[in-house]
Image (cartoon, helix red, strand yellow):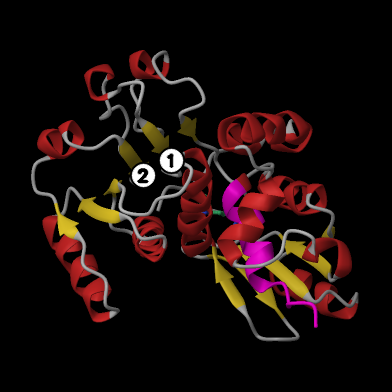
Amino acid sequence: MTRLKQNDVIMIPTALEEYNAELVRITGCSLREIAAHAAGKGASEASTLKPRVAVIPMTCGQGIIEGFVESVASIICFLGFDAVITKSRDAGGLAEAVQNGSEILFMADDDRFVAINLRTGKVSDNGDATGKGYVSGLFHMCDGLESKNVLVFGAGPVGSSAALALKRFGAEVSIYDIDLSASRLLSKKLMNQGYAIKVETDLNEALGSHNILVDACPSADFIMPQHISEDTMIAAPGIPLGVQAAGLAKLSNQLLHDPLQIGVATMIFDVLECSP
Ligand code: 2YG
Protein backbone atom coordinates (compact mmCIF):
# COMPACT_ATOMS: atom_id res chain seq x y z
CA MET A 1 0.00 0.00 0.00
CA THR A 2 1.52 3.30 -1.11
CA ARG A 3 1.95 5.99 1.57
CA LEU A 4 0.70 9.36 0.35
CA LYS A 5 2.98 12.38 0.42
CA GLN A 6 2.05 15.96 1.29
CA ASN A 7 2.32 16.83 -2.43
CA ASP A 8 -0.30 14.24 -3.33
CA VAL A 9 -2.99 15.78 -1.10
CA ILE A 10 -2.13 19.40 -0.38
CA MET A 11 -4.18 20.83 -3.29
CA ILE A 12 -7.28 18.64 -2.89
CA PRO A 13 -9.40 20.96 -0.67
CA THR A 14 -9.10 23.93 -3.04
CA ALA A 15 -9.69 22.01 -6.28
CA LEU A 16 -12.75 19.84 -5.57
CA GLU A 17 -15.19 21.75 -7.81
CA GLU A 18 -12.76 21.50 -10.74
CA TYR A 19 -12.01 17.84 -9.89
CA ASN A 20 -15.74 17.05 -9.93
CA ALA A 21 -16.24 18.78 -13.28
CA GLU A 22 -13.38 16.71 -14.72
CA LEU A 23 -14.98 13.56 -13.28
CA VAL A 24 -18.27 14.40 -14.99
CA ARG A 25 -16.44 14.94 -18.26
CA ILE A 26 -14.63 11.56 -18.02
CA THR A 27 -17.41 9.38 -16.58
CA GLY A 28 -20.62 11.37 -17.04
CA CYS A 29 -21.14 11.15 -13.25
CA SER A 30 -20.35 13.29 -10.22
CA LEU A 31 -18.19 12.11 -7.32
CA ARG A 32 -21.35 11.61 -5.26
CA GLU A 33 -23.02 9.50 -7.99
CA ILE A 34 -19.93 7.31 -8.48
CA ALA A 35 -19.47 6.77 -4.73
CA ALA A 36 -23.14 6.05 -4.05
CA HIS A 37 -23.26 3.64 -7.01
CA ALA A 38 -20.13 1.86 -5.70
CA ALA A 39 -21.63 1.53 -2.22
CA GLY A 40 -25.01 0.38 -3.57
CA LYS A 41 -26.72 3.43 -2.08
CA GLY A 42 -28.94 6.12 -3.60
CA ALA A 43 -27.01 9.32 -4.44
CA SER A 44 -29.69 11.41 -2.75
CA GLU A 45 -29.26 9.53 0.57
CA ALA A 46 -26.67 12.13 1.57
CA SER A 47 -29.25 14.88 1.60
CA THR A 48 -31.64 13.01 3.90
CA LEU A 49 -29.14 11.64 6.44
CA LYS A 50 -26.92 14.12 8.28
CA PRO A 51 -24.59 12.10 10.50
CA ARG A 52 -21.80 14.11 12.11
CA VAL A 53 -18.39 12.95 10.84
CA ALA A 54 -15.08 13.33 12.71
CA VAL A 55 -11.70 13.02 11.01
CA ILE A 56 -8.98 12.15 13.52
CA PRO A 57 -5.25 12.83 12.93
CA MET A 58 -3.08 9.85 13.93
CA THR A 59 0.57 10.40 14.94
CA CYS A 60 1.56 6.69 15.13
CA GLY A 61 4.06 5.04 12.79
CA GLN A 62 5.52 7.53 10.31
CA GLY A 63 3.15 10.11 11.73
CA ILE A 64 1.05 12.91 10.31
CA ILE A 65 0.91 13.60 6.54
CA GLU A 66 0.47 17.36 6.15
CA GLY A 67 -2.86 17.98 4.43
CA PHE A 68 -4.18 14.44 4.80
CA VAL A 69 -7.01 14.96 7.34
CA GLU A 70 -7.81 18.32 5.74
CA SER A 71 -8.27 16.61 2.37
CA VAL A 72 -10.38 13.82 3.84
CA ALA A 73 -12.66 16.32 5.64
CA SER A 74 -12.95 18.54 2.54
CA ILE A 75 -14.05 15.60 0.35
CA ILE A 76 -16.70 14.58 2.89
CA CYS A 77 -17.97 18.18 3.22
CA PHE A 78 -18.02 18.52 -0.59
CA LEU A 79 -20.49 15.59 -0.63
CA GLY A 80 -22.82 17.50 1.70
CA PHE A 81 -21.90 15.89 5.02
CA ASP A 82 -20.87 17.70 8.22
CA ALA A 83 -17.22 16.72 8.79
CA VAL A 84 -14.92 18.21 11.41
CA ILE A 85 -11.23 17.55 12.17
CA THR A 86 -10.71 16.85 15.86
CA LYS A 87 -8.41 19.28 17.68
CA SER A 88 -6.78 16.40 19.53
CA ARG A 89 -4.97 13.49 17.90
CA ASP A 90 -4.96 9.74 18.50
CA ALA A 91 -6.85 8.65 21.65
CA GLY A 92 -7.65 12.28 22.54
CA GLY A 93 -9.16 12.75 19.08
CA LEU A 94 -11.22 9.61 19.44
CA ALA A 95 -12.55 10.77 22.84
CA GLU A 96 -13.27 14.26 21.46
CA ALA A 97 -15.18 12.79 18.50
CA VAL A 98 -17.37 10.60 20.70
CA GLN A 99 -17.98 13.45 23.16
CA ASN A 100 -18.99 15.85 20.36
CA GLY A 101 -21.59 13.35 19.17
CA SER A 102 -19.88 12.18 15.99
CA GLU A 103 -21.52 9.09 14.51
CA ILE A 104 -18.89 8.36 11.85
CA LEU A 105 -15.11 8.41 12.39
CA PHE A 106 -12.33 8.52 9.76
CA MET A 107 -8.73 7.77 10.76
CA ALA A 108 -5.59 6.31 9.20
CA ASP A 109 -2.39 4.81 10.54
CA ASP A 110 0.33 3.46 8.25
CA ASP A 111 -1.48 0.18 7.62
CA ARG A 112 -5.22 0.88 7.68
CA PHE A 113 -7.38 3.84 6.61
CA VAL A 114 -10.90 3.23 7.92
CA ALA A 115 -14.32 4.81 8.29
CA ILE A 116 -16.35 3.56 11.28
CA ASN A 117 -20.07 4.05 11.92
CA LEU A 118 -20.33 4.05 15.74
CA ARG A 119 -24.07 3.46 15.68
CA THR A 120 -24.22 0.49 13.28
CA GLY A 121 -20.70 -0.89 13.75
CA LYS A 122 -20.19 -0.76 9.94
CA VAL A 123 -16.50 -0.40 8.96
CA SER A 124 -15.25 0.62 5.51
CA ASP A 125 -11.60 0.07 4.55
CA ASN A 126 -10.05 2.51 2.10
CA GLY A 127 -8.53 -0.27 -0.03
CA ASP A 128 -11.87 -2.02 -0.50
CA ALA A 129 -13.74 1.24 -1.05
CA THR A 130 -11.16 2.52 -3.56
CA GLY A 131 -11.30 -0.69 -5.62
CA LYS A 132 -15.08 -0.66 -5.99
CA GLY A 133 -15.26 3.11 -6.34
CA TYR A 134 -12.91 3.05 -9.32
CA VAL A 135 -14.83 0.15 -10.90
CA SER A 136 -18.00 2.23 -10.56
CA GLY A 137 -16.22 5.02 -12.45
CA LEU A 138 -15.00 2.57 -15.09
CA PHE A 139 -18.52 1.17 -15.46
CA HIS A 140 -19.73 4.64 -16.48
CA MET A 141 -16.68 5.29 -18.71
CA CYS A 142 -17.40 2.04 -20.61
CA ASP A 143 -21.22 2.28 -20.58
CA GLY A 144 -21.39 -0.97 -18.58
CA LEU A 145 -18.94 -3.84 -18.14
CA GLU A 146 -21.08 -6.91 -18.98
CA SER A 147 -18.91 -9.48 -20.87
CA LYS A 148 -16.12 -6.93 -21.35
CA ASN A 149 -12.48 -8.04 -20.89
CA VAL A 150 -10.79 -6.13 -18.06
CA LEU A 151 -7.18 -6.51 -16.92
CA VAL A 152 -6.40 -5.69 -13.27
CA PHE A 153 -2.82 -4.91 -12.26
CA GLY A 154 -2.14 -5.62 -8.61
CA ALA A 155 -3.70 -8.33 -6.41
CA GLY A 156 -3.52 -6.26 -3.23
CA PRO A 157 -6.54 -4.85 -1.30
CA VAL A 158 -7.50 -2.37 -4.05
CA GLY A 159 -7.02 -4.79 -6.98
CA SER A 160 -8.86 -7.56 -5.14
CA SER A 161 -11.83 -5.31 -4.42
CA ALA A 162 -11.80 -4.11 -8.04
CA ALA A 163 -11.72 -7.69 -9.38
CA LEU A 164 -14.73 -8.68 -7.26
CA ALA A 165 -16.68 -5.55 -8.24
CA LEU A 166 -15.87 -6.20 -11.93
CA LYS A 167 -17.14 -9.80 -11.69
CA ARG A 168 -20.32 -8.52 -10.06
CA PHE A 169 -20.80 -6.26 -13.12
CA GLY A 170 -20.41 -9.33 -15.37
CA ALA A 171 -16.94 -8.51 -16.74
CA GLU A 172 -14.36 -11.08 -17.87
CA VAL A 173 -11.48 -10.40 -15.47
CA SER A 174 -7.75 -11.11 -15.79
CA ILE A 175 -5.26 -10.39 -13.01
CA TYR A 176 -1.57 -9.61 -13.32
CA ASP A 177 0.64 -9.18 -10.25
CA ILE A 178 4.43 -9.03 -10.17
CA ASP A 179 4.09 -11.75 -7.51
CA LEU A 180 2.40 -14.69 -9.29
CA SER A 181 1.43 -16.29 -5.97
CA ALA A 182 -0.61 -13.17 -5.12
CA SER A 183 -2.55 -13.52 -8.40
CA ARG A 184 -3.11 -17.21 -7.73
CA LEU A 185 -4.33 -16.53 -4.17
CA LEU A 186 -6.81 -13.92 -5.42
CA SER A 187 -8.02 -16.32 -8.12
CA LYS A 188 -8.63 -18.99 -5.46
CA LYS A 189 -10.45 -16.53 -3.15
CA LEU A 190 -12.77 -15.40 -5.94
CA MET A 191 -13.33 -19.00 -7.08
CA ASN A 192 -14.57 -19.74 -3.54
CA GLN A 193 -17.10 -16.94 -4.05
CA GLY A 194 -18.17 -18.43 -7.36
CA TYR A 195 -16.21 -16.14 -9.65
CA ALA A 196 -13.59 -17.35 -12.15
CA ILE A 197 -10.80 -14.98 -13.19
CA LYS A 198 -7.79 -15.53 -15.47
CA VAL A 199 -4.25 -15.31 -14.04
CA GLU A 200 -1.90 -13.54 -16.47
CA THR A 201 1.81 -14.43 -16.29
CA ASP A 202 3.21 -12.25 -19.10
CA LEU A 203 2.86 -8.48 -18.64
CA ASN A 204 3.35 -7.49 -22.28
CA GLU A 205 1.08 -10.21 -23.60
CA ALA A 206 -1.61 -9.14 -21.10
CA LEU A 207 -1.22 -5.46 -22.01
CA GLY A 208 -1.33 -6.31 -25.72
CA SER A 209 -4.63 -8.15 -25.41
CA HIS A 210 -6.65 -5.76 -23.21
CA ASN A 211 -8.15 -2.31 -23.80
CA ILE A 212 -9.78 -1.87 -20.39
CA LEU A 213 -7.25 -1.64 -17.56
CA VAL A 214 -7.37 -1.18 -13.78
CA ASP A 215 -3.97 0.00 -12.49
CA ALA A 216 -4.13 -0.97 -8.81
CA CYS A 217 -0.39 -1.42 -8.28
CA PRO A 218 2.40 0.84 -6.98
CA SER A 219 4.55 0.50 -10.11
CA ALA A 220 5.16 3.55 -12.30
CA ASP A 221 5.45 3.89 -16.07
CA PHE A 222 4.69 0.32 -17.17
CA ILE A 223 1.79 1.26 -19.47
CA MET A 224 3.48 2.58 -22.60
CA PRO A 225 2.17 4.53 -25.62
CA GLN A 226 2.18 1.38 -27.77
CA HIS A 227 -0.28 -0.20 -25.31
CA ILE A 228 -2.77 2.67 -25.74
CA SER A 229 -5.36 3.03 -28.51
CA GLU A 230 -8.52 5.15 -28.88
CA ASP A 231 -10.45 2.25 -27.31
CA THR A 232 -8.27 2.13 -24.19
CA MET A 233 -9.94 2.94 -20.87
CA ILE A 234 -7.86 3.12 -17.68
CA ALA A 235 -9.07 3.31 -14.07
CA ALA A 236 -5.91 3.99 -12.04
CA PRO A 237 -6.20 4.09 -8.23
CA GLY A 238 -2.56 3.04 -8.02
CA ILE A 239 0.01 5.61 -6.86
CA PRO A 240 2.30 6.47 -8.62
CA LEU A 241 0.42 6.35 -11.93
CA GLY A 242 1.34 3.36 -14.10
CA VAL A 243 0.85 5.23 -17.39
CA GLN A 244 4.04 6.65 -18.92
CA ALA A 245 3.92 10.42 -19.49
CA ALA A 246 4.19 9.84 -23.28
CA GLY A 247 1.09 7.64 -23.02
CA LEU A 248 -0.93 10.32 -21.23
CA ALA A 249 -0.94 12.46 -24.38
CA LYS A 250 -2.87 9.68 -26.17
CA LEU A 251 -5.55 9.51 -23.45
CA SER A 252 -8.28 12.11 -23.45
CA ASN A 253 -11.21 11.41 -21.10
CA GLN A 254 -9.99 7.80 -20.98
CA LEU A 255 -8.05 7.93 -17.68
CA LEU A 256 -9.49 8.02 -14.17
CA HIS A 257 -6.84 8.79 -11.53
CA ASP A 258 -6.88 10.63 -8.18
CA PRO A 259 -4.94 10.18 -4.92
CA LEU A 260 -7.87 10.11 -2.44
CA GLN A 261 -11.22 11.46 -3.66
CA ILE A 262 -13.00 8.38 -5.03
CA GLY A 263 -11.85 6.17 -2.14
CA VAL A 264 -12.95 8.58 0.60
CA ALA A 265 -16.25 9.34 -1.12
CA THR A 266 -17.03 5.61 -1.38
CA MET A 267 -16.06 5.07 2.27
CA ILE A 268 -18.65 7.56 3.55
CA PHE A 269 -21.43 6.03 1.43
CA ASP A 270 -20.26 2.56 2.53
CA VAL A 271 -20.82 3.30 6.24
CA LEU A 272 -23.87 5.54 5.77
CA GLU A 273 -26.98 3.97 7.22
CA CYS A 274 -29.67 3.43 4.55
CA SER A 275 -32.60 5.78 5.13
CA PRO A 276 -35.77 3.81 6.13
O1 2YG B 1 -3.32 11.05 10.26
C1 2YG B 1 -2.39 11.23 9.45
O2 2YG B 1 -2.08 12.33 8.94
C2 2YG B 1 -1.56 10.01 9.07
N1 2YG B 1 -1.53 9.01 10.17
C3 2YG B 1 -2.18 9.41 7.77
C4 2YG B 1 -1.33 8.23 7.27
C5 2YG B 1 -1.95 7.62 6.01
C6 2YG B 1 -1.06 6.48 5.50
N2 2YG B 1 -1.75 5.77 4.41
C7 2YG B 1 -1.67 6.23 3.15
O3 2YG B 1 -0.99 7.18 2.82
C8 2YG B 1 -2.53 5.56 2.13
N3 2YG B 1 -2.70 4.13 2.38
C9 2YG B 1 -3.88 6.27 2.18
C10 2YG B 1 -4.84 5.89 1.10
C11 2YG B 1 -4.27 6.03 -0.29
C12 2YG B 1 -5.40 6.00 -1.30
N4 2YG B 1 -4.96 5.51 -2.57
Which region is colored magenta? 262-276
Residue positioned 75% across, 86% down in the render: 119
* 72 in magenta: no
Query: Residue 240, percent across and down?
Result: 41, 35
Q: Is residue 113 left or right of residue 187?
A: right
Is residue 265 in the magenta section?
yes
Residue 180, picture quadrant? bottom left
Q: Position of residue 190 (x, y in %)?
A: 27, 72
Dot 2: what SS? strand
Q: Are the residues tagged 1 and 2 within 8 Å (C-beta)?
A: yes
Which residue carries the number 1 mark? 235
Work out whether residue 162 can be spotted. yes
Q: Mark 1: give few (<14), some (14-19) or many (20+) Cα within 10 Å.
A: many
Q: Residue 44: percent from the left, percent from the top?
A: 79, 60
Label 2 environment density (alpha carbons within 10 Å; few <14, some 14–19, many ≥20): many
User: Is 222 located above or below residue 149 in the figure?
Assistant: above
Which of 130/92 is in front?
Answer: 130
> Disc 1 marks which amino acid?
Ala
How far apart in space, not on screen, are marks 1 and 2 (Cα)?
5 Å
Q: Residue at x 84, y 54 (%)?
A: 80
